[in-house]
Image (cartoon, rainbow, N blue to C red):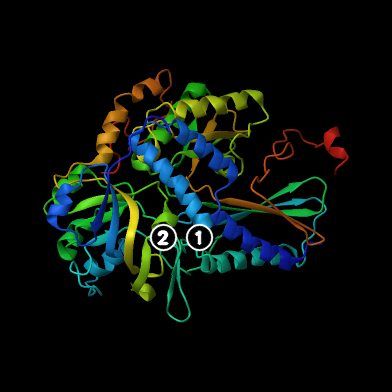
Amino acid sequence: MGNARKPREIRLSTTPTAEALAELRLGDIVYLDGLMYTAREGVYKRALEDKANIPLQLPSQSAANFHCSPAARINPDGSFEMGAVTATASFRFAKWLPEWLAKSGARLVIGKGGMSSKDYKDYFVPNGAIYLSTVGYGTGALLGRGVENVEAVHWNEELGLAQAMWVIRCNRMGPFIVASDLDGNCLFERENQRISENLHKAYEGTRPATLKRFGETDDKSDELIG
Amino acid sequence: MIPIDVIEKTAETLMDKAAIEIPDDYLEGLKAAASVEDGDLSSFVLQAMLENYKAAKEDRRAMCGDTGTPRWYVKMGNETQVEGGPVALEAALRRATAAATNGVPLRPNRVHPLWRTDHDNNVGIGAPEIEYGYEPGGEWIDLITVHKGGLFGTDYRMLFPSDGIQGIKRFFLDSLVAFGKRGLACQPAIIGIGLGGCKDTCMVLGKRAACLRTVGDRNTDPKIAELELEFTELGNSIGMGAMGFVGKSMVIDTHIEVGYCHTGGMQMSVHAFCLSSRRAVARVFADGRVEHRTDPEWFTDYQRRETVEWEMPASHEKSA
């Protein structure tokens, strides 16, 4: 590798204290210990829109919501086999997250790609929550090694294996990157801002398309997801 | 006659290898990128990926939790016959896909687009895709599985002759920047570009360019080969790296494939084959022999032919 500096590494509980979260800086590398659950659109719809009872004590058992569908199976004897775990892109869940954070008390939202700083300021900060991004993307095998045990899978019949609520016991599960802090600052926006300052150089001499498309932006600093 | 049980067994092995073993050509490409990356966070990400490939092989677990959408490319020599015919062949590939989804395990990604029905086995309407190709001469069948991941990193645009190379570059950059932000394209990746054809074939060409050619392979048209190198350099000069962090690793290699198109247009598609470039290949012979490899060798002179008739080049005649 070139002249890269190694980022700071920290171990964190999945039911973290406010003080522990306040310590975290954008770009820190985090490894998690404790219970974590997967919840994405299927779980959000069922819990928030269909008002189903959440089959877990939140946030006392876990304050860590993983946007993930594992590569896993349920064995005929009811035990679980979990191979690789990787996050899915979180911005698609913005619709449900304000209500979910308030209801679940989640302090850690773990996923791919992060949210906008507006999302962080609007409902992460008031709920004392931060966002952790997986690394890669696709360190699925490394994250799989951090799964000490699959404790349960809920709503599998209703939602299917991919959308079910998996409850995972983590032992130094990681790496994850701190992508937002308690002030609502956004790591990806910071990086995008640095990159877009110089983007015009790469574009020099290229030609905008002859036929334009509706609904597009040509603002290269646009975050595109909001 | 190729024995059908060997096809099914081989197909299951391929599903397993594709999900777990990063192909050597991509691994070498990523190591080279990691050796020059100097962005702090980008560099950390690339090192973590290299560790991840190792962990996947050691533990025999899928390298990424999103194991993509398994599909099959099947190619046959002209003299090939499959025991039970094409229907038996498709049944064997569907069975292998379902069995490996449960066996490896893979993530059961495939659902009905409207009802979200999940059979938990990656099989359903139109899934897995099975595409075919043929080569003159020979009695063998190539089974190629690709588990391309991701919802991001792919785009299509109708360009026109007046857009020219500078218009192609623009759309290439637009696609990299748009999907590279926050690392949605799971870069650095092999980028496939389809040019020409019709809209559907343009997409097919770009996807095959990304998934069925290995790092370092160049198009046989020397001018296109030059463009491939130029685009890789351009993609790595935008200041972005892994996960959309400041860096310089976006593209491990660029592959361009072309097809003849409508005289007024210049269709273009861009496909990013993610950090887990899952592909595995085996050739099965009539005597039941199986040879594994990671290079699909899909784009032969025959596949890229542009004449009405096809005459085997002299160098190939002996082996055919």
Q: Position of residue A197 (x, y in %)?
A: 29, 25
Q: Is residue B35 visible?
A: yes
Q: Position of residue B132 (x, y in %)?
A: 67, 52
Q: Position of residue A124 (x, y in %)?
A: 17, 52
Q: Is residue B221 left or right of residue B234?
A: right
Residue occupied by mark 1: B59
Residue B12: name its quadrant: bottom right
Asked if disc 1 and disc 2 are in contact, CB closer than 8 Å, the reply is: yes
Query: Residue A213 has which mark?
Result: none
Query: Residue A145 has which mark?
Result: 2
In the foreground, B198 or B18: B18
Query: Going 61% across and 52% down the picture, which residue do you hit?
Result: B280
Element type at marker 1?
Answer: helix
In the foreground, A185 or B118: A185
Residue B262: name its quadrant: top right
Residue B214 vertical position relative to residue B263 in the rendered view, above or below: below
Residue A72: name its quadrant: bottom left
**Residue type highlighted by circle 2:** Arg
Q: How many marks?
A: 2
- Protein chain holding label 1: B
Instruction: State the separation of the CA atoms marked 1 and 2.
Output: 9 Å
Q: Are marks 1 and 2 on the same chain?
A: no
Task: Name the quadrant of the N terminus of chain B.
Answer: bottom right
Element type at marker 2?
Answer: helix
- Protein chain holding label 2: A
**Residue type highlighted by circle 1:** Asp
Query: Going 45% across and 38% down the picture, which residue do you hit?
Result: B188
In the foreground, B85 or A81: A81
Q: Is residue B123 left or right of residue A2?
A: right
